[in-house]
Amino acid sequence: MEVYQTNPGLVNENCIKFDVDELWLVVQGGLDKLLRTMGLEVARQLLEREAEALVGKKGKHSKERTAYRHGVEKTKIVMGGAKVPLERPRVRSKDGGEVRLETLGYLQQEDALDQRILVQLLAGASCRKYVRTVEAATPCSVSKSAVSRRFIDAMKEEIKDFFSRRLEGCYPVIMLDGLQMGKLTMMVALGIKADGTKQILGLMEGATENSTVVKSLLGNLLERGLNETEPRLFVIDGSKALHKAIKDTFGEKALIQRCQVHKKRNVLDHLPDSEKEAAAHEITLAYQEFEEENAKKKLEFLAHRLEYRYPAAAASLREGLDETLTVHRLGIGGLLRETLASTNALESANSLCRQTVRNASNIQDGAMAIRHAVAGFCEAERHFHRVRGYRDIHILIAAIRRLTSPPDGDILQVA
C-alpha cells in the first residue's frame, strides 16, 4: 500500500492510504468514478480504524479488550445522492451483543440523500428517472417508490414553513389566478411589495375557481398578518368569483384591475379570423392611451362598431370595461402600467411552477396538489426579479390611497 497525500510532511499513522497503481487505473475511467472509489475506500478505512480502536489490530491478542471481531457484513452508506453497497467489519462485545460503529451512523445519515432527491426533482427529474441522474460507479439502491417517499418527507418542512410565513409590511398589489393541477384548481396569490419584489403569498386548493375557495385563501392571508385596512390594487383575470371574494373581504379598500390581455382574448374569441387582426390592433391602441377618458372612448367606439354584426363580441368588450382601465384611472404609466395591466407576472410564476412539477402527471388528492404546488412555487421564487417599473410604486401607493380613502382617511404605512 502506498500513501497518497499532497503534503508528505504530514504523513503519519492516521493518514488514509490508497494504492496509487489502482487509483491510476480508476482515473482512466473518469474523475467521477475516481472520486466515488476514493470515497468508498475512505469509508472502508474509517470503519476499519474504529473497529481496530475497539478490538485492537488483527492477529494481536489483548487481555484488556472488551470486544472482538465477528467477520464482515454487507451494508449500504449514503454517497453522491444514492445508497451504495459496502462491506463493514462487525464487532461484538464479550457478552455477545453487537457493537454499533459510530462511524457507520454518520455514513448512513439520510438528510443529504433527502436533500439531493428534493433538488433533483425540483430541477425536473422524475421519480422514475432519478437513478439516471446519479452517476454512481457502483450499483445504487434508490427505487422510484423510495424517491417518492423521500420527496414527501423532505417537503413536509417546506410546506410547514410556506404556510407559516408572516405577511408583514406593505403589499400595494396582489395578483390572483387559478392553476389547474390534475382535477383540482389551485388558487394562487402573488404579492408585490413596495420595493417591487414579488412573493407567493398563499395557495388554496379547490374543485373550481369559486368565491368560497378565494375567500378561504384571502382569510388565510389575513390570519398570517396581511393588513386588512391597507388599500391595495388587486389584479385578476376577470373572474366574477374572484371579484366577489375580494369585495366581500376588503370592501372599498380594494381596487380591481381586470387583465387587459384576457379581455382582448375574450373579445377576439367571438370574432371570425377575418376580423381578429383589426380588432386586436384597435384594442391595443386604446389601452395604450394614457388618459382613461381617451382609452374608454376608443373602446366604446369599437364596441359600437361591432354591435350590429358581432353583438357577442361587443357585449364581451363592454362587460367590466371600467375595471380594465383602473391603471389609467390611477394615473400611472410606463413600465409599471404594463406590469399591472395584466396578470402576466403571475402567469409567469405559474409557468415556472408547471415546469418544475411537469412530471407529476397523476395528482390524486389535495395533499399531493399542495405538495407539488409548494415545491413548484418555492422553486419559482428563486427566479423572481423586481417588477418592471418598480421605481414608480410610490406613485401607485399614493394614487391608491387617494381613490380609496376619504379626505381624512388613514395614511398608508409603507414598509
Image (tube, grey):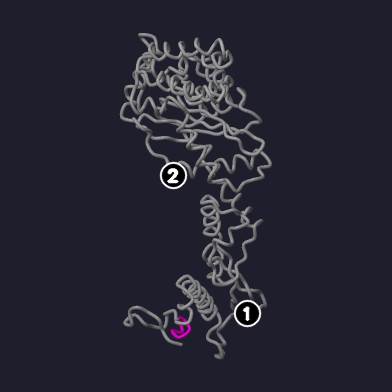
Q: Secondary structure at mark 2?
A: loop
Coordinates of residue 58 in the picture (x, y in percent): 55, 87
Task: Report the front residue among 216 and 178.
Answer: 178
The span picked out in magenta is 18-23
For residue 72, the mark is 1
For residue 165, the mark is none
Q: Quadrant of residue 66?
A: bottom right
Where 246 falls versus 184 (above or below)? Answer: above
Coordinates of residue 300 in the picture (x, y in percent): 46, 11
Which amino acid is tagged 2? Arg
Q: Residue at x 52, y 25 (%)?
A: 265
Which amino acid is tagged 1? Val
Give the mark nearer the N terminus: 1 vs 2. Answer: 1
Mark 2, residue position: 382
User: Which mark is nearer the camera, 1 or 2?
Assistant: 2
Give the overall secondary structure of the magenta segment: helix
Crowdedness near tag 1: few (<14), some (14–19) or many (≥20) residues, C-alpha within 10 Å: few
**389 in magenta:** no
Where 1 falls versus 43 (above or below)? Answer: below
Coordinates of residue 53 in the picture (x, y in percent): 51, 79
